[in-house]
Image: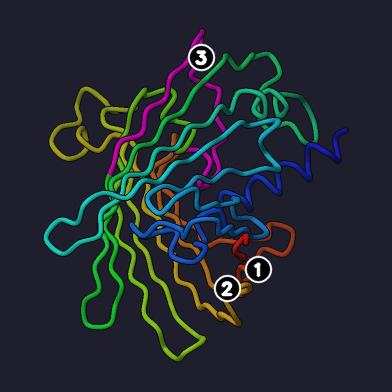
Amino acid sequence: MVNIRKVAFIFLFFTICFGDVYNWKSHSANILPRKRFEIGLFHPFRYGYSNTLEYSMYPIWFLVMPNLTLKKSHNKLFDYDVASRWSLYYPSPILNMFSREGLGGLIDPNFKVPPMLGLSISLLFTKKLLDIDMTFNSGVDIGLSFGDLDDRINIELPLIYHRLSVFHNNYGFHTGLDLEKSITKKISTLIDFDFSVLPGMNTKKTDSGIAKLLGEYSFEHKALLIYEKSETFRLLTGYKFVYGEYPFGSESRILPFLPLLDTWVPMIELQWGRTFN
């Protein structure tokens, strides 16, 4: 069971790290064509339900962390393609699975994680400029706890800590920019910058101005090289940089990072897509 928990956590960490290693245009305001599906090693399953609506979910995690994302297109605004994205997830089962002592334990077993529901709402604006596909996104994150949530229930690791902290702060905001450009017919590159804040969280009475406004924050940046063999398969490689404010201070890290080797390794993601007849 310990080994299962350890493997589950490693896979969860890589899913969070690579989960936004975008499928074909999943980061943009463009909607997946009707009846087309796409999936990756660490990426969620996406399906084009109609010409204006798509949904996605992590099927492997659904039993221990139910999750669902809907993306809907809207009318153009100043030549920008516009879409809204609604994400809902229930992390309590998997967090209680990691609440144990010893190997595989990431949360003190004396704490019981109450039922929690996370909601993230984003607006996406996409436009092509100078042969670069640009997407701006901005939105709000809401964390609801239906019970007593101890302040010490968290996992102080890059990517995971700030995503769980929204349940302690109840709300947060995020914004980002994605830039994608084709280099050749089959090779392209993507760079993104994402910033999230939890206003007022863990601020001191002496804090003022921008420090009090930001509270705890995180900055994430990713650079990818994409090889698209066909409409049914592509390979991605690159890195992810994370900088954030934690209870122990600020920290930066390039991911994926292998603690046993004390080194960074490039991320590798394989993705598949197909259209149902």
Name above or below for residue 127 compared with residue 202. Answer: below
> Would residue 255 be counted in the magenta stretch?
no
Q: Residue at x 66, y 35 (%)?
A: 62
| Residue at the extreme front of the image, as rendered | 277
**Which is nearer the N-term, disc 1 or disc 3?**
3
Which callout, 2 or 1, points at the residue further toward the start of the chain?
Answer: 2
Q: Nearer the viewer, mark 1 or mark 3?
A: 1
Q: Using the image, determine if residue 138 lies above or below residue 32.
A: above
**Of helix, strand and loop, which one carries label 3?**
loop
Type of residue at label 2? Answer: Leu
Quarter-wise, where is residue 157 in the image? Answer: top right
**Residue type at tag 3:** Leu
Find the magenta span and give its range. 139-162
Percent x, y of residue 137: 29, 52
Q: Are marks 2 and 1 in contact (CB under 8 Å)?
A: yes
x and y, in percent, of residue 113 in the image: 60, 17
Q: Amino acid at mark 1?
A: Leu
Q: Secondary structure at mark 2?
A: strand
Q: Quadrant of residue 107?
A: top right
Pointers 1 and 3 in contact (CB under 8 A)? Answer: no
Residue on which the image places disc 3: 149
Q: Is residue 136 shown above or below 171? A: below
Residue assigned mark 1 = 270
Position of residue 155 in the picture relative to residue 63 (left or right): left
Q: Nearer the viewer, residue 187 or 170?
A: 187
Q: CA distance from mark 2 to mark 3?
A: 38 Å
Residue closest to the eye, 232 or 5: 232
